[in-house]
Image (cartoon, rainbow, N blue to C red):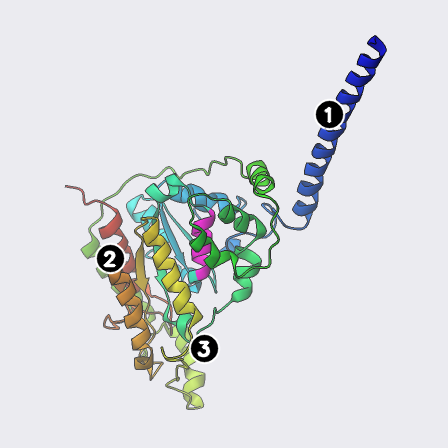
Amino acid sequence: MIKKLLTKNFNWHFRAFSLSLFLTAFTFFIIFNFKNLNYLDIQGNSSIIPKQRYSKFHDLNENSYYVLKNTLENGEITLLGTSELGSNNTIFTSFNFFPQKLGIQLRAFGSAGYQSKAILTEILSVLNPKSIQNGRIVILISPTWFLNGKQMNDSLWRNEIATPLNLTRIRINPLIKPSIKEKILSDTNHTWFSDFTDQVLIKYFDKNVSIKKLNLTSKNPKMVSLKEIAMSIDKKIINNSYNVNDDYFQKAIKPLLKFKKLPLQIQSIGLDQPNFEVNDFKDLVECLKVFKIKPLFVIMPLNQKIFSNLDEINSTIELIKKNLNIVEFPFLDLWSKPQDVGLLTDSVHLGALGWFFVDEFILKNYIPEKK
């Protein structure tokens, strides 16, 4: 009798041990293999944007997901855009101006092709009560996004943004409604594990990472005098009728003039044709409204002296403004602003004066005026 009980007890313990050993081995198998398959890549390619597009005000070795997450949770100003962020790196470029002139932390994230769908995917991947409550987001909208109706760089979204890890974060996030998840997940070929397994994997890899803050001293400069400085910077480097910096004029404009290729013609589809980028933009605005995140938008200009048929894009620009007005999101309309010297530094990128207007807009909306 005792022998039978011991045998039975041994068999039960052996099965329990075997099962726990199998589950442990299986878990390590999943983690090891999918880590090697870039499933949960937190050290290799950035899950947000190429590192050279970051603001220089943080350690470039830190993983981009944690930088964006911490930035939003801490209530730091987050500037999102495309190649505009990598141009004309003057003191008035926002990620220079706010820390250096105002003593306020601002981080910039962006890359060519980092457009509406990429921005929405990123925001959803870091979405939590703290980032929703504290997030201060500024989004630069370029008219060039909407010209051909397609994403400018779909491979960026698929390879750098919609990583399996980011998609899993979105899929298991209970704050995100299924209809919103579908907007992102329906365009991927990712195979999911069970909810439990995905939650275990996310919990394993998403550790609490603290991003070091700058030790900044708050300042209160006079914006009127700074505008004059911005204008003086531009006048030193812009001495041509196209209102572009002289180096760009020599290298880009002169050859076009020589072969009589100016003004350039914008190739744009009309609103009567399918425009995936317009739909992505509407999704972005709708989701930000659902989560009660109130961002700022900047509608960028194109050089009216280089392009001759910009009126063909006006209907698209008006549609963008209409969508922003409906949800009451503040926006800065640089598209309609007089193109004085310094608004642009080339055909599409802002000059010092253009960045000054962006800085002034952010300051007015996000930084309470000191009395």
Numbered label attached to residue 16: 1
Give the label, 2 or 3, closer to the camera.
Answer: 2
The residue range painted magenta reads 117-125
The residue lying toward the viewer, choosing from 253 and 107, is 107
Question: Which residue position is annotated with label 3?
Answer: 251
Report the amino acid beneath label 3: Lys
Quadrant that contains the N terminus: top right
Disc 2 versus disc 1: nearer the observer: 1
Report the magenta stretch's main SS: helix
Q: Position of residue 338 (x, y in %)?
A: 23, 72
How far is disc 2 from disc 3 in space, using C-alphas?
42 Å
First in residue order: circle 2 vs circle 1: 1
| Residue 237 as seen in the image, left or right of residue 158 | left
Name the residue that disc number 2 marks.
328
Looking at the image, tell me whether mark 2 or mark 3 is earlier in sequence order. Answer: 3
**Nearest the eye: 88 or 190:** 190
Q: Is residue 347 magenta?
A: no
Q: CA distance from mark 1 to mark 3?
A: 74 Å
Which residue: 42% across, 83% down? 254
Can residue 158 be seen at all in this image of the molecule?
Answer: yes
Which quadrant holds the C terminus? top left
Residue 13 appears in which quarter of the rendering?
top right
- At label 1, the amino acid type is Ala
Q: Is residue 306 above or below residue 187?
A: below
Q: Position of residue 83 (x, y in %)?
A: 44, 64
Q: Quadrant of residue 343?
A: bottom left
Counting residues from the start of the chain, the first of labels 1 and 3 encountered is: 1
